[in-house]
Image (spheres, rainbow, N blue to C red):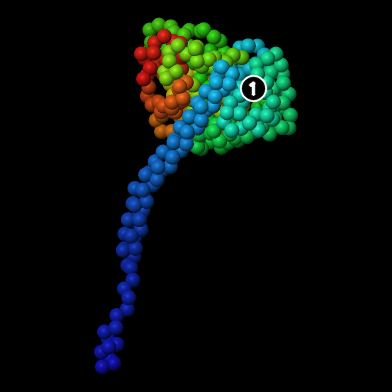
């Protein structure tokens, strides 16, 4: 019967407003649960890339040692010692420039035309680095020198003529005055003074024989964070000063370990505090110290002199952290 068939026909039932809101809420909860896992997976990938970069730098340093029978100097300069602030007449080529041929950047290295250590090395560098080709070369971001976890804007450093590119790795200058050999300091939490020499110093490349504590016990290169404004010279890969491409983790005074949260822990000329509140600097000072830093949660990566990479917890005790940066402190039992 046509009439009854019409009565039995049903229209599709739509979602009610309440049901729609419940579905949306469930989807929101699922996203909230999944997002941290996605972020952790991404950070794990970034951390893995950072570790690979450090392995490449360690291999490059070993190849340099095999070629020249020594590691590169931290930097070359005129006064054979401390380079105050960022004065251009003090700054010559640094370790990161010297390793360019060993990290597949020979073409960039050739632009600088750096010679081995001799009387005119710094003068020639100052000419080449200020010429158009040198300005191009110093502005480059080297993949092997950049940690993907550092989300800071890669704004070039504007000092010393400007247009200096950024990086995230710094040579270990020890835990004292990296520009002086043979100095001794007493780390925070330790009872006696020990030799504080790191693997890198001024105008002189050290060799393996100098590492009497053992190459697996001493840091070669550590992570460093990029300055967040153009006047902050932290993370400038081609500039051989504290915080740019050199760390000397004093483990005394204001500097207490990796990823130090103290607002005065980095003594770097014209630097500014990090916006995320993870530590800052003593502004307006001379370049005397900068601590190893990273944006990896809870750790900082370092490559040891033997080429192995370690993820060091930022809670490491201060004497151990100091001794990891000294190549002949005489207390290797303190090393993890």
Which residue is located at x 50 percent, y 26 percent?
Answer: 58
Residue named by callout 1: 93
Picture coordinates of residue 97, whole percent (x, y): 61, 26
Quadrant for the C terminus in the image: top left
**Is 14 left or right of 307, judged from the image as shown?**
left
Q: What element carries label 1?
A: loop
On screen, residue 271 above or below 186: below
Q: Where is residue 268 in the image (x, y as percent from the top left)?
A: 56, 21
Judging depth in this view, the residue of 24 and 296 nearest the camera is: 296
- Name the outermost residue toward the bottom: 1
Question: Which quadrant of the figure has residue 79?
Answer: top right
Which residue occupies the foreground of this view, 335 or 107?
A: 107
Q: Judge whether residue 78 can be spotted in this image.
A: yes
User: In the rendered image, is residue 254 in sight?
Assistant: no
Relative image position of residue 2 (x, y in whole percent): 29, 92
* Nearer to the camera, 195 or 163: 195
> Residue placed at 63% from the left, 34% from the top?
140
**Quick one: quadrant of the N terminus?**
bottom left
Q: At 68% across and 14% down in the image, what residue appears?
A: 118
Left or right of residue 306: residue 230: right
**Where in the figure is residue 136, as x and y percent of width and height?**
68, 34
Q: Quadrant of residue 181?
A: top right
């Amino acid at each position: 019967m046509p009439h009854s068939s019409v009565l039995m026909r049903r229209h599709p039932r739509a979602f009610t407003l309440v049901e729609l809101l419940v579905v949306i809420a469930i989807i929101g909860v699922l996203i909230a649960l999944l997002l941290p896992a996605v972020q952790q997976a991404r950070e794990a990938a970034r951390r893995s890339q950072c570790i690979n970069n450090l392995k490449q730098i360690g291999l490059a340093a070993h190849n340099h040692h095999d070629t020249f029978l020594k590691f590169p100097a931290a930097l070359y300069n005129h006064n054979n010692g401390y380079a105050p602030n960022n004065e251009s007449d003090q700054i010559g080529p640094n370790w990161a420039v010297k390793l360019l041929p060993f990290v597949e950047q020979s073409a960039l290295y050739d632009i600088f035309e750096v010679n081995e250590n001799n009387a005119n090395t710094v003068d020639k560098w100052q000419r080449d680095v200020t010429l158009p080709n040198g300005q191009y070369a110093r502005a480059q971001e080297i993949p092997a020198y950049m940690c993907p976890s550092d989300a800071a804007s890669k704004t070039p450093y504007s000092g010393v003529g400007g247009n200096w590119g950024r990086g995230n790795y710094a040579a270990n200058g020890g835990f004292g005055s990296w520009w002086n050999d043979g100095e001794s300091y007493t780390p925070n939490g330790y009872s006696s003074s020990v030799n504080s020499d790191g693997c890198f110093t001024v105008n002189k490349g050290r060799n393996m024989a100098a590492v009497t504590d053992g190459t697996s016990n001493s840091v070669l290169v550590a992570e460093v964070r990029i300055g967040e404004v153009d006047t902050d010279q932290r993370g400038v890969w081609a500039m051989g000063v504290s915080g740019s491409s050199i760390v000397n983790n004093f483990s005394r005074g204001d500097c207490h370990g990796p990823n130090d949260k103290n607002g005065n822990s980095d003594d770097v000329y014209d630097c500014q505090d990090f916006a995320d509140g993870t530590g800052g600097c003593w502004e307006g000072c001379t370049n005397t110290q900068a601590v190893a830093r990273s944006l990896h949660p809870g750790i900082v990566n370092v490559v040891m002199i033997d080429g192995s990479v370690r993820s060091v917890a930022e809670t490491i005790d201060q004497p151990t952290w100091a001794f990891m940066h000294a190549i002949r402190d005489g207390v290797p039992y303190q090393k993890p």
